Image (cartoon, rainbow, N blue to C red):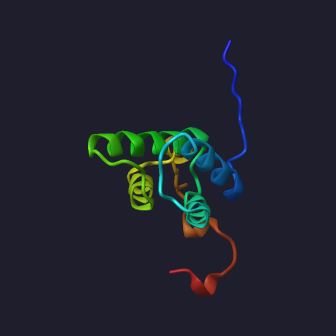
Amino acid sequence: MDIDVRLDMPSDEDRYLIFKEHLSHIENTIEDGVLKMIARASSGFVSSDLSQIVRNCHIKAIKNNCESISRENLEAQILESKPLSIQDMIVEVPKVLWSEIGGNEDIKF
């Protein structure tokens, strides 16, 4: 039996708290105000995305012999990541002819 569980997308505040929790276990130089800005800019990311972003930053910091994660590291990782919420999204454009749309004769080609 498959179970489909759907949760609301995290808000700006939720994303901030998720980032804050994950970063609390890792040495970082990211100020609180900057973290709030990054959380606002990471719309579309779910909790697992944010966790993976922080994890990838930490791994890259270790590989580069950095002592902590910086704002630049986090922002770069966000830009490299694709949110799970849109990975499976398929946009289907319906085939509609102008003749099927009523009204607005003056703007139809």
x 45%, y 60%: residue: 71
x 55%, y 62%: residue: 31
Q: Quadrant of residue 59?
A: top left
Residue 25 in the figure: left or right of residue 8: left
Outermost residue, top direction?
1
Instruction: Return the x and y of residue 101 as percentages of the image width and height.
Output: 64, 68
- The total number of labels drawn is 0
Outermost residue, left direction?
64
Q: In the depicted view, which residue is nearer to us: 13 or 63?
A: 63
x 69%, y 26%: residue: 4
Q: In the depicted view, which residue is nearer to us: 52 or 106?
A: 52
Instruction: Return the x and y of residue 88 as percentages of the image width and height.
Output: 51, 40
Quadrant location of the N terminus in the rendered image: top right
Q: In the depicted view, which residue is nearer to us: 48 or 18?
A: 18
Instruction: Return the x and y of residue 28 as percentages of the image width and height.
Output: 47, 52
Instruction: Return the x and y of residue 37 as percentages of the image width and height.
Output: 58, 66
Residue 83 in the figure: left or right of residue 9: left
Residue 67 in the figure: left or right of residue 29: left
x 54%, y 64%: residue: 97
